[in-house]
Image (tube, rainbow, N blue to C red):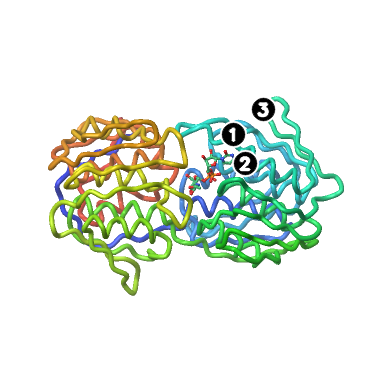
Amino acid sequence: MDSIVVKGGAPLSGEIPISGAKNTCLKLMSAALLTEQPLTLMNVPRLSDIRTMASLLESLGCEVAMLNNGQVMVLRAGNIANAKADYEIVRKLRASFNVLGPLVARNGTAVVSLPGGCAIGARKVDLHMMALERLGATLELRDGYVHASAPGGLKGAVIDFPFVTVGGTENALTAAALAKGTTVIKNAAREPDTVDLCKCLSAMGAQISGAGTSEITVQGVDALHGATHQVIPDRIELGTFMVAPAIAGGSVELLGGRLDLVTAFAEKLDAAGVQVAETERGIQVSQTNGRARAVDVVTAPFPGFATDLQAQMMALMCTAEGTSVLEETIFENRFMHAPELMRMGAQIDVHGGVAKVTGVERLTGAPVMATDLRASVSLILAGLAAEGETMVSRVYHLDRGYERLVRKLSGVGAKIERVSA
Ligand code: UD1
């Protein structure tokens, strides 16, 4: 199994191109099931999660063609041959549960595996199901699968989420697009991923207003049509690479990066003494004043501080001056990187959803283990600043969500390589 080896201490300089957003692209791909015409996605990131979603869609009867070296994807669900999303795929990729809404809306029936828990928490789907029931679908749980049917079609309704769910909002949106009448989604997710999905659905002929606010209104239409849509830049990849020069020192321009996608995160970096500036081509991040300063962070739905950037921020805080408190409010078990960072000399106390990090002057390289996607990348970031060599094993987690990570980081001077065992 491959590992990634990082030799710390090299300051970074140069530029890193930001890829298309994984989490957005996965949901856009599921929207292709809503029409028999082709949906063309541009700026697709080349990642194993994207390939997993493509194979799920193929198993449902959707044709998937990759063009332009994998950066353009043409999806055509001419005919849904089989409306069953198998456990073997859904358990690997939770976003695949989002085929439920489009399948019921287009086909009147669907069988989708329950995703089960995952390393970062229970991650329930009860609110996805509540939303579809509000739209008139009948759902039954059998053998670990959700059996959904709406023989007479879905009907518009008010869906009031008790708290923000990104996946739930997106399942509701795609289902409501083809429902009869008007759907109002209250307490809707405001994440850029959800806004981009609304934009793509609108290009396909959906009638949607309020995207980016907490109340989205969907006027159902009889059919959607094909469209071409450009996937937004990946805000989590962007935030991750913003930490790289902040922790290792130096100055890096993140090409295609947009500050509006990472406002809360950039404000925290600024408070930590890291220089963040918009440029014509993206965002420039520099750290030329030595160590960052400790800042406190509470994760929250967008526009708050993203849970997917908490591990990377913790890595930065490990070598900051002072003590910081990081509170995780979205997922109940999302500090698995803490014990691994402690193997590198970090001082961290975890109590429930709160981690207290006391910065040390220098981390030291160590063999560490990746546990999930964002946890793994925090270990790579810590390795950039550590004395000596850090070896991160189980890198298949990174392949799920970071396109050409080693190439991008070595391009700005990091001493990093992938080795096969
Ligand atoms: C979450 C993140 C999203 C991130 C994605 C990938 C938030 C609000 N969501 O989206 O930004 O890109 O992970 O890592 O930050 N929940 C239920 N019942 C449900 C659905 C959700 O109890 O039916 C709970 C979840 O367990 C979680 C919270 O609601 O505690 C938010 O979950 P949700 O936004 O749905 O998760 P994702 O869509 O995976």
* Badge 3 element: loop
Q: Are marks 2 and 1 in contact (CB under 8 Å)?
A: yes
Residue at (23%, 57%) from the top-left corner? 412
Q: Amino acid at mark 3?
A: Gly
Q: Are marks 3 and 1 in contact (CB under 8 Å)?
A: no
- The residue indicated by pointer 1 is 115
Q: Position of residue 208 (x, y in %)?
A: 67, 65
Q: Is residue 36 above or below residue 60?
A: below
Question: Which of disc 1 and disc 3 is earlier in sequence?
Answer: 1
Q: Amino acid at mark 2?
A: Phe
Residue at (70%, 64%) from the top-left corner? 206
Q: Is residue 346 above or below residue 230?
A: above
Query: For the residue carrying disc 3, how many other residues have a C-alpha within 10 Å: few (<14), some (14-19), or many (20+)?
Result: few
- The residue indicated by pointer 3 is 144
Q: Is mark 3 within 8 Å of ligand 1?
A: no
* Badge 2 element: helix
Residue at (38%, 64%) from the top-left corner? 257
Question: Which of disc 2 and disc 3 is earlier in sequence?
Answer: 2
Q: Position of residue 109 (x, y in %)?
A: 78, 42
Quadrant that contains the N terminus: top left
* Badge 1 element: loop
Q: Quadrant of residue 2?
A: top left
- The residue indicated by pointer 2 is 97
Question: For the view shown, which residue lies furthest in the bottom direction?
Answer: 280
Question: For the view shown, which residue lies furthest in the right direction?
Answer: 152
Measured in 3D between alpha carbons, the distance from the residue under mark 3 to the one under mark 1, in whole angstroms, is: 9 Å
Q: Position of residue 369 (x, y in %)?
A: 32, 31
Q: Amino acid at mark 1?
A: Pro
Question: Which of disc 1 and disc 2 is earlier in sequence?
Answer: 2
